[in-house]
Amino acid sequence: KGCKFAALTLSHYLAHNHLPSPEQLLSPGCLMSFVSMALTLAATAILLFSSAVSAINPIVVKGNAFFDSKTNQRFYIRGLDYQLGGSSLATTYDPLADSAGCDRDVAAFKSLGINTIRVYSILNNGDHSHCMNLLADAGIYLILDVNTPLISINRANPASSYNAVLLQNIFATIDAFSSYDNVLGFFAGNEVVNDVATVEAAPYVKAVVRDMKAYIAKQSKRTIPVGYSAASVAENRGPLAFYLNAGEDDTRIDFYGLNSYEWCGASSYTISGYDQFATLFQGLTIPLFFSEYGCNKPAPRTFTEVEAIYSTQMTSFLSGGLVYEYSQEANSYGLVQISTDKKSVSYLTDFNNLKAEFAKTPNPSGDGGYNASITANNYPSNTTNFEVTTIIPPMPEAAKIYLQKGAGTPLGNTGPSNQGYATDVPSAGSGSKVSTASGSTTSSNKKGAAGRVMVTIPSIFIVLGVMAIVI
């Protein structure tokens, strides 16, 4: 009776409004016309939706350099480190989920002429679509640290902090950003090894790299490079680069960032020691770049190192760099001052000096003399300052399910810490190498510390899907 009443009510409504009857609506001609209209609307919605997402070509690694995946032109990193508020906000604030902040700051990025930013810490349960698309519109790529001040490898006790909690957070962060073509790469760690005593943490960095690459291979639509950002510690910055690029392909980093503050004031290629980098990193078969640079003594900074960084003296082994840092914090490395109401920025002298140096320093033409070799480097010999096992700890059993089923719900800063309770991870050197795939992030101590993307599908697709079932 209810169905009959509904049919009568529908017929009365259609007749009263001079609309076709149910029989006419279900006639083949009328139904096909409606389907045709729905398909047209759906196609229009697809075009509109696609046009809202900026086209930017992914960057790929070839030998010891970066290249645009479509144009095949060499890509040089010319950018900034971007973490507003420094360490004081790193656990609660996500600069890539702050739409108003991105609107304000991307305008400054464009004025400066950069193509890359590095972000040290985000909340992986935030909505990053506005900022990521805004960056893509401006032709700007992201290098993202996947750790947070709450969840990272503890250099003092790496075995206890390498566990499923750590990997779930890292994998959920990968999920949140892997759909964006302007993600240049992920940092698996930042200055985890920062002196001779913490070299024992290096195998755990390689383990995280392996796990990230395995997860990306299983869960991402494209291969995204995974690298490491190193402290420029004279005793181990060279050996660590070769160590992290040695061994099986799935444990090798794809790029190496160096936090370098050697060039201060009126320096030069030789006075700064930049010439020694050419020797130190000779033969490194992955891209090297400065993941931080810009000594702030004396002030203001003149950034005369820019000319050297993008010269053919260095481009055979160096792919540019990231200036530390965008916003003025307590450590006085900032390029801009953000207003107290957070609505505007004032360009500091350092900003204008850097802009002038960028403007007068083009990238070299051609390939910059890069090394096309993709062969893994050999493990460095153990020395007094760099003695470490080459045996990599296996992936925690509790984390292996993520490779097949995904990381699940991103927890942001609401989940548990990974520190101090791993029970299923043997110490590095206690077992054999384990391969799981075929193929605390804060900035350095002398400076401020530094969910899954949801896409709204137009409702026309839902209507079309129902119609397809009816037909």
Image (tube, grey):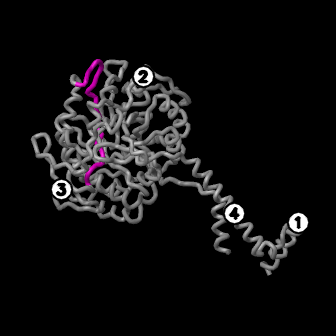
Q: Amino acid at mark 1?
A: His
Instruction: Point out residue 82 in the picture as x, y percentages from the top left corner.
Output: 42, 35
Quarter of image, res 13:
bottom right
Q: Judge by depth and name the residue closer to the eye, 265 or 83.
A: 265
Q: Is residue 379 found left or right of 53 in the rendered image?
A: left
Q: The N terminus lies in which quarter of the figure?
A: bottom right
Q: Earlier in the sequence, mark 3 or mark 1?
A: 1
Q: Amino acid at mark 2?
A: Ala
Q: Residue at x 30, y 45 (%)?
A: 255
Whether residue 297 can be seen here? yes
Q: Earlier in the sequence, mark 2 or mark 1?
A: 1
Residue 251 in which image quadrant: bottom left
The amino acid type of the residue labelled 3 equals Ile
Residue at the disc numbered 1: 18
Residues in magenta, as a range = 251-269
Front disc: 3 or 2: 2
Q: Which residue is mark 4?
A: 38
Residue at the image position 37 percent from the left and 48 percent from the top? 60
Residue under numbered circle 3: 391
Sequence-wise, the earlier of marks 4 and 2 is 4
Amino acid at circle 4:
Ala
Query: Mark 3 and mark 2: span between their CA atoms?
Result: 48 Å
Badge nearest the viewer, 1 or 4 = 4
SS for dot 1? loop
Q: CA distance from mark 4 to mark 3?
A: 59 Å
> CA separation, marks 2 and 1?
70 Å
Mark 3–mark 1 Cα distance, whole angstroms, equals: 79 Å
Measuring from the top left, give residue 61's x and y in whole percent: 33, 47
Question: Residue drawn at (54%, 28%), measured in percent from left and top?
Answer: 344
Residue 453 position in % (x across, y down): 50, 53
